[in-house]
Amino acid sequence: MQVSARSLTNVPIIGFSTNEKLGLIQSVIIDPAKMKVLFLTVHATNSKTHAFLPASEIREITHRHCIIDSQTSLTTSEDLVRHERLIVDPVLLLRYKVVTHSSHSLGRCYDFVFDSHTMALTKIYVQATHWQRIFINHHIIDVSDVLRIKTKQHVIVVRDALLTELKEAKNVLPAQTS
């Protein structure tokens, strides 16, 4: 099942064994090298601090709920030493600038979709730049078109040929009838 990252904000996390609400999802952190969801940041119900939920601990996730085994699946940043770089400066993708390899701006990422079983990203939704909105409001980009993610610059780089394909797709729109 495909899940939108934006649709997960404030979705309850439920413990499988107790059916108890353990917290609310705050954001989705990805691994830019693997293009997969790595963690969810969680506002735990029994704590004033944020916790992290490794993607490997998720039994089921939809836009309505996230089911995990138990409270022990939630962890703190101290327990995630090997992922410290992503905890300190998480890759959220939302609001990242999307550009072609030759630096042509396509807009900003406003959402992304991932497969709920593999946690692999599948699509990136891009709000078109201001001048492009005259013709089209957004672009849907397949993850296979992503060349790399520059985390320090908050930029997603896509292949140059995608720009031509997007322009051709825009010209295929049906003619307006009077």
Image (tube, grey):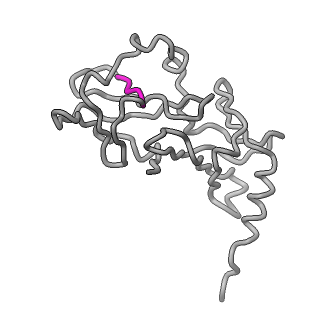
Above or below — where is 19 with respect to 80? below
Question: Seen in the image, is 158 located left or right of residue 58?
Answer: right
Q: Which residue does the image show at 50% across and 34% down from the upper left?
A: 37
Q: Which residue does the image show at 15% across and 33% down from the upper left?
A: 18
Foreground residue among 56 and 13: 56
Q: Which residue does the image show at 32% across and 23% down from the upper left?
A: 74
Instruction: Give the residue at the far right of this rendering.
Output: 102
Let me know if residue 60 is in the magenta part. Answer: no
Above or below — where is 102 with respect to 43? below
Foreground residue among 17 and 175: 17
Mark count: 0
Above or below — where is 82 with respect to 15? above
Residue 59 percent location from the top left of the image: 33, 37
Residue 148 percent location from the top left of the image: 70, 33
Foreground residue among 25 and 15: 15
Instruction: Give the residue at the far bottom of this rendering.
Output: 178
Question: Seen in the image, is 51 located left or right of residue 124?
Answer: left
Residue 166: which quarter of the image? bottom right
Magenta segment, prevailing SS (helix, strand or loop):
strand
Residue 71 percent location from the top left of the image: 24, 25
Q: Which stretch is magenta? A: 51-55
Question: Seen in the image, is 35 located left or right of residue 48?
Answer: right
Let me know if residue 54 is in the magenta part. Answer: yes
Q: Which residue does the image show at 43% across and 34% down from the upper left?
A: 27
For the C terminus, the quadrant is bottom right
Residue 72 percent location from the top left of the image: 27, 21
